[in-house]
Image (cartoon, helix red, strand yellow):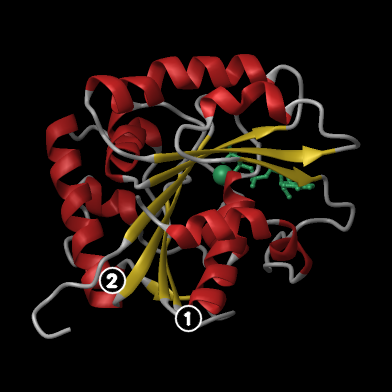
Amino acid sequence: MGMLKPRHVVVTFFSGAKGGTGKSTLAANLAILLSQSLKTNVLLIDLGIDSSQTSSRILGIADRPGVFDYLVGSVGDLNQLVIRSSYLPSVFVVPPGNVRSYQMTVGNNEAFDRWVYLVNYLVMTTDSQLVLIDLPANNTMPVVIPPLLIAHIINVVLEYAAYSEYVLREVDNAYILPMLTRLRYRKIINIVLNKAMGQDNIGGRIREFAHNGDVFVIPMSHSPLPNHRPKAGCPLRIKGLTRSLQEGPQ
Ligand SMILES: Nc1ncnc2c1ncn2[C@@H]1O[C@H](COP(=O)(O)OP(=O)(O)OP(=O)(O)O)[C@@H](O)[C@H]1O
Ligand SMILES: [Mg+2]
């Protein structure tokens, strides 16, 4: 490679304002699965601010300084924020940290600059080809917008339910279309319908929202999904998603 910086792909998990759809569960499981199947280091950045059950915890990492401590300026050394997962050492995890969202007083531009620096720095130091960003169900500007802007792939994760069509239309109008059409970003937008029970009769109706991407239906898992440990069974169910992720940006 010499002086060439290796190419990396940024994937975010997003659900607009709708909480509990499975973003963190998918992000944690995909971090392990993709690191194994692609044989590459993976950087998981957990932005689950205010959440007690989020992707870094699923990977066994809790109560450490994290990304928001850096964004508000209380931790300056990025190396302090990243830790290898004890489940798989090729997965590097940055937890959200100790800041609450009401303490996120930093301005949008400053937060964006720090955010971009953080991702670039950690991609280099961890030698990761893949960056997964777990977003909270929260649409405060400095938290959600920068990860959406820098993403090559956005997985919009919603529940497999009739109402998701309406949530999806809102997310498409408010976030996705402005980036794709107004700002002319080239991105893959996948729609992930999680916790499906029974037959697929919704997936087809929402195809129009999967820009350059696909619709993935993930069944409700009856064995409880990972609480504090990624489950071996779960990744198999998201194989289709993996395939799309492996293709990377177009
Ligand atoms: N396919 C599935 N089958 C059954 N349960 C699931 C599935 N996916 C996620 N869950 C469960 O749903 C709950 C919410 O999942 P998770 O925390 O991943 O959602 P989230 O979108 O990250 O939530 P938040 O918006 O709060 O960040 C968890 O209890 C998780 O175990
Ligand atoms: Mg979450």
Which residue is the extreme one toward the left? 3
Q: Is residue 103 left or right of residue 194?
A: left
Quadrant in which the N terminus is drawn: bottom left
Q: Is residue 91 left or right of residue 9?
A: right
What's the residue at 67%, 67% (across, down)? 230
Q: Residue 138 versus residue 206: which sits nearer the camera?
A: 206
Q: How far across and down, in percent of the image, does residue 17 sit?
A: 52, 24
Residue for badge 1? 39
Mark 2: amino acid: Gln
Quarter of the view holding residue 43: bottom left
Residue for badge 2? 80
Assess whether mark 1 and mark 2 are in contact (beta carbons under 8 angstroms).
Answer: no
Q: Residue 31 versus residue 229: which sits nearer the camera?
A: 31
Q: Residue 148 versus residue 109: which sits nearer the camera?
A: 148
Q: Does the closest atom of ligand 2 sit within 8 Å of the Cβ of label 2?
A: no
Residue 233 - label: none
Q: Work out whether residue 107 can be spotted.
A: no
What's the residue at 26%, 66% (across, down)? 7
Q: Is residue 216 above or below residue 67?
A: above
What's the residue at 45%, 38% (across, down)? 212
Q: Is residue 36 above or below residue 33?
A: below
Q: Quadrant of ligand 2?
A: top right
Q: How far across and down, in percent of the image, does residue 68 sit?
A: 32, 48
